[in-house]
Amino acid sequence: MKIVIFGGGGFIGSAIADRLLLDGHELRIFERPRVEPYRTFSPDESVEWIAGDFMSSFDVGNAIDGMDVVLHLVSTTLPKSSNEDPIFDVQTNLIGTLQMLNAMVDKRVQKIVFISSGGTVYGNPSYLPINESHSTNPVVSYGISKLAIEKYLLLYQHLYGINSTVLRVSNPFGERQRIETAQGAVGVFLYKAIIGQPIDIWGDGSVVRDYIYVTDVAEAFAKAIYYHGTESIFNIGSGIGTSLNQLIGLIEDSLDLIITKNYLPSRAYDVKANILDNSLAFKELGWSPAFDLNVALKNTAQWIRSQLAC
């Protein structure tokens, strides 16, 4: 199939692109200007790398033209910073997505897979693990925007027949995650542990999250592009909760060292626990996580060390 990946050069997007190339798909990767390809592609890999502005209907329309499937991975904000400027969050994420959907209607592209946020759209859970029918009450603008995009995808499915699949991904980590910024606890904790810096923990370390290896996320997308069933929204997580204190313990065991920890005041936007029920994805997509957390942590630590050695 011919697949355009918006945000295909980033942490998650590059993992998805590599996975789809294994199946022989033809890829068009849409990235911001001056973003270089994350690796050199071989002559037998069909990859077209294009640069453009996600807010430009012209650029987005050109990227979608002639494609069979659209993968939407673009996000201009992070959960922790989205509340600082919710207007920017809506203008860049929600409006940009609506322009994308209009381009799909114009170009007659009938399939989209969108990465939503299983870690933020539900808010504080009333039960665990959280299934797809759980109430959605986000406490950050990031989650509200993701949820609004989900609703518009379903609207365009109803109005124009665009088959929409939403993957609510929990807390992804792995290779190519940005180690120099606060993008995900696992990446930040591993990086600081490896270079010998103390780790800051907001709260007492009891906050529980569902951590999922990026390779497993990529596999979910590889299956979702073929899905045309009656369901539209799937949780993509490990189904296992790990507290921050437990995570640090696993990292210490993995790296065979002791980590210095700084406990700071808790943050209002941090829900106490988030664990996703992934049984619907197993039933409908035939997907389940293949990587144990310990193995995935060791793989990620090895990659971070390789980057530091460059």
Image: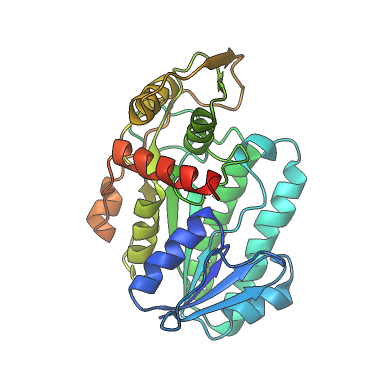
Taking the spot 41% from the left edge, 50% from the top edge, the residue there is: 214
Tally of numbered discs: 0
Kindly tell me whether residue 63 is visible in this rendering: yes
Kindly tell me whether residue 239 is visible in this rendering: no
Seen from the viewer's position, the closer of residues 190 and 169 is 190
**Looking at the picture, does residue 176 appear above or below residue 133?**
below
Seen from the viewer's position, the closer of residues 244 and 310 is 310
Coordinates of residue 11 in the picture (x, y in percent): 52, 54
**Which quadrant: the N terminus?**
bottom left
Q: How is the image coloured?
A: rainbow
Outermost bottom residue: 66
> Quarter of the image holding residue 285?
bottom left
Left or right relative to 59: residue 267: left
Taking the spot 34% from the left edge, 70% from the top edge, the residue there is: 228
Taking the spot 34% from the left edge, 59% from the top edge, the residue there is: 219
Taking the spot 34% from the left edge, 31% from the top edge, the residue there is: 254
Coordinates of residue 154 in the picture (x, y in percent): 49, 61
Coordinates of residue 261 in the picture (x, y in percent): 52, 16
Left or right relative to 183: residue 166: left
